[in-house]
C-alpha cells in the first residue's frame, strides 16, 4: 500500500474536510461506539448523521451504484474514514447493517431484496441487526437451535437469540435458523431476512456491565417469514453466514485499531494528566502510553494489509481475523493505560471531567474481545489456515469438520 495520497485522493480529502467543517453543527460527534451508548435519545441524531453522510456520498462509497452506493474504491473509503475520525464524527449507528447484514444481502439476496433494502440500509432509514448467537451457541454457532419449518403461508420460526446488537432499534434482521434437524449441523441451516415488527418478535434489552443496553434477547414465537425473504438456498445458510462473519471481521479489523474505543482521545486525556501525577505513577503511565502507541501502529498496519488484499480483489480471509485480534490488543492496552493512570479508581472513575471514559473502557474491553469471534477462535483460525497447525481439538472430537466451518 502506498501511504501517500494520489492527486485524486488528495482532492477527495480536501473536499471531505471542507464538507465536515461546513456541516459540523448538523453532525453527531463521539469518542467511539463502546464509550457512548446509542440510547434512544441519541439514536435519531445518529440516524440523521448517517443520512447526511450518505447523501454527501461519504457512506457506502464502495457499494454498487445500482443500489445507492458510490461504486468507488476501498482506498477512497479509507480517506473518508480518516477524515470522519479526525473530525470526531460519531461512528455510523447502522454499523451492523453496513458491516454485516448489507454485504450478506448483496452477496446472496434476490434483485428485489437488494432494491428494497440496500439504499435504505446505507442511509439508516432502516436499522438492521444480526440474529445469530443463542444461549447455547456462540463460538459454536452451527449448534444453534432456532427452528424454521415450512408451511403453505411461509416459514414458521420458533426460538431465541441473544446478544443481538441494536435489535431494539432495528426494523430488519438477518436470521440464521435450522431447517433440517436431520442433516449434519453445518448443513441444515438457512438464512432469512426477518421484519422485526412481525407478530411474535419480542425484544428484551440486556444491561451490560458498562451500564449500556446495546444488545438484547430476541424471542421468536411462531414468526412467519415469506419464502421470498430467504437469503440463499434452503439448507445452505452456513455458506451465507460465512459471508456475514468474514464481512464482520473485515468491518472490525479493517479500520486499523479503532474498535469502538477511540484510543487517541484517551491517550490525549492521559497525556494531559501527566504533570499532576507522582513520579512512580507518571513512569507507569508513560510506559502504558508507549504500549498503546505500539499496539495502535501494529493494528493500523495490519488493517492496511487487509485493505490492500481486498483492494487487489481478494476476499477477506485470515487477515480479517488478524485485524480483529490486533484491534482488540489496542483496546486492552488502552484499558491498562487507565489503570496505570488512575489505579483502582479507573474502574469507578467518574469524578474528574472525562474520566468516565476510563471506567467505560475497562468494562467494554472484555465484550470487544468476544464480539465478532472470540480471541481464541480467531487464533485457532490463524493457527490452522496460516500456520498449518493441527485442527482445534474441540472441533476434532467427536467429528472432524473442515477449517472453513469454524465460526
Ligand atoms: C459486544 C457484543 C456484541 C455482540 N453482538 C452480536 C450480534 O449483534 N449478533 C449476534 O448474533 N451475536 C452477537 N454477539 C455474540 C458473539 O458473537 C458471541 O459472544 C461470541 O460468538 C462468543 O460466543 P459466546 O458468548 O457464547 O461465548 P462461548 O462460545 O461460550 O465462549 C466462551 C469462551 O470460550 C472460548 N472458546 C469457545 N470455544 C473454543 C474453542 N473451540 N477453542 C478455544 N476456546 C474456545 C471462547 O474463546 C471464549 O473465551 C455479541 C457479543 C458481544 C460481546
Image: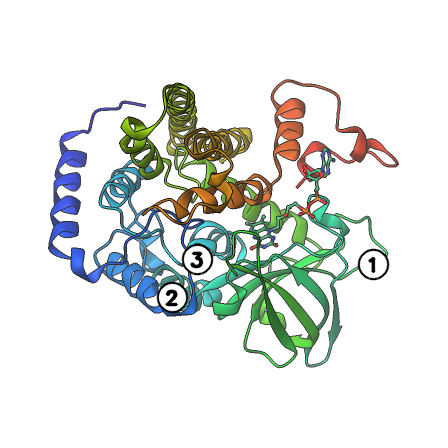
Residue at the spot of label 2: 43
Residue 264, position as x, y percentages in the image: 32, 35
Q: Which residue is painted at 41% across and 66% down in the image?
A: 115
Q: Going from the N terminus, do you reach mark 2 or mark 1 first?
A: 2
Q: Is residue 200 left or right of residue 50?
A: right
SS for tag 1? loop
On-image quarter of the C terminus: top right
Classify mark 3: residues with Cα within 10 Å, few (<14), some (14-19) or many (20+).
Answer: some
Residue 64, position as x, y percentages in the image: 35, 52
Residue 200, position as x, y percentages in the image: 66, 79
Badge nearest the viewer, 1 or 3:
3
Residue 252, position as x, y percentages in the image: 46, 41
CA gap, disc 1 and disc 3: 38 Å
User: Would you identify the image quadrant in which residue 10 lies?
Assistant: top left
Classify mark 1: residues with Cα within 10 Å, few (<14), some (14-19) or many (20+).
Answer: few
Residue situated furthest front in the rendering? 278
CA gap, disc 2 and disc 1: 39 Å
SS for tag 2? helix
Q: Is residue 231 visible?
A: yes
Q: Tell which of 17 and 354 is nearer to you.
A: 354
On-image quarter of the N terminus: top left
Badge nearest the viewer, 2 or 1:
2
Q: Quadrant of ligand 1?
A: top right
Q: Going from the N terminus, do you reach mark 2 or mark 3 first?
A: 3
Q: Tell which of 1 and 187 is nearer to you.
A: 1
Residue at the spot of label 3: 37
User: Colour mode?
Assistant: rainbow
Q: Going from the N terminus, do you reach mark 1 or mark 3 first?
A: 3
Residue at the spot of label 1: 181
Q: Tell which of 86 and 366 is nearer to you.
A: 366
Q: Which residue is painted at 47% across and 39% down in the image?
A: 346
Amino acid at each position: 500500500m502506498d501511504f501517500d495520497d494520489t492527486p485524486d485522493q488528495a482532492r477527495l480529502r480536501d473536499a471531505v474536510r471542507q464538507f465536515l467543517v461546513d456541516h459540523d453543527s448538523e453532525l453527531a460527534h463521539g469518542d467511539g461506539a463502546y464509550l457512548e451508548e446509542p440510547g434512544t435519545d441519541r439514536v435519531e441524531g445518529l440516524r440523521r448523521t448517517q443520512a447526511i453522510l450518505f447523501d454527501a456520498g461519504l457512506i457506502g462509497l464502495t457499494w454498487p451504484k445500482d443500489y445507492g452506493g458510490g461504486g468507488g474504491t476501498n482506498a477512497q473509503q479509507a480517506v473518508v474514514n480518516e477524515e470522519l475520525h479526525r473530525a470526531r464524527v460519531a461512528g455510523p449507528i447502522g454499523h451492523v447493517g453496513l458491516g454485516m447484514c448489507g454485504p450478506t444481502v448483496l452477496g446472496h439476496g434476490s434483485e428485489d431484496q437488494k432494491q428494497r433494502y440496500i439504499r435504505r440500509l446505507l442511509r439508516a432509514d432502516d436499522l438492521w441487526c444480526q440474529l445469530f448467537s443463542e444461549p447455547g451457541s456462540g463460538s459454536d454457532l452451527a449448534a444453534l437451535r432456532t427452528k424454521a419449518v415450512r408451511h403453505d403461508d411461509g416459514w414458521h420460526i420458533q426460538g431465541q437469540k441473544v446478544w443481538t446488537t441494536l435489535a431494539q432499534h432495528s426494523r430488519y434482521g438477518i436470521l440464521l435458523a435450522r431447517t433440517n434437524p436431520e442433516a449434519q449441523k453445518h448443513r441444515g441451516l438457512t438464512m432469512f431476512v426477518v421484519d422485526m415488527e412481525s407478530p411474535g418478535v419480542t425484544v428484551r434489552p440486556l444491561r451490560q456491565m458498562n451500564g449500556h443496553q446495546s444488545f438484547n434477547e430476541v424471542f421468536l414465537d411462531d414468526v412467519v417469514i415469506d419464502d421470498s425473504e430467504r437469503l440463499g438456498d434452503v439448507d445452505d445458510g452456513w455458506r451465507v453466514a460465512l459471508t456475514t462473519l468474514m464481512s464482520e471481521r473485515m468491518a472490525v479489523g479493517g479500520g486499523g485499531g479503532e474498535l469502538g474505543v477511540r484510543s487517541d482521545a484517551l491517550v490525549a486525556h492521559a497525556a494531559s494528566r501527566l504533570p499532576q501525577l507522582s513520579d512512580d505513577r507518571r513512569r507507569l503511565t508513560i510506559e502504558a502510553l508507549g504500549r498503546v502507541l505500539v499496539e495502535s501502529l501494529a493494528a493500523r498496519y495490519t488493517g492496511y494489509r487487509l485493505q490492500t488484499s481486498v483492494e487487489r480483489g481478494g476476499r477477506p480471509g485470515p487477515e480479517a481475523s488478524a485485524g480483529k485480534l490486533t484491534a482488540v490488543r489496542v483496546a486492552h492496552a488502552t484499558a491498562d493505560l487507565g489503570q496505570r493512570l488512575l489505579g483502582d479508581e479507573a474502574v469507578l472513575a467518574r469524578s474528574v471531567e472525562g474520566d468516565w471514559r476510563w471506567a467505560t473502557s475497562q468494562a467494554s474491553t472484555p465484550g470487544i474481545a468476544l464480539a465478532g469471534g472470540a480471541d481464541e477462535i480467531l487464533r485457532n483460525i490463524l493457527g490452522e489456515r496460516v500456520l498449518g497447525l493441527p485442527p482445534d481439538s474441540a472441533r476434532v472430537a467427536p467429528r472432524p469438520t473442515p477449517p472453513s466451518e469454524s465460526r
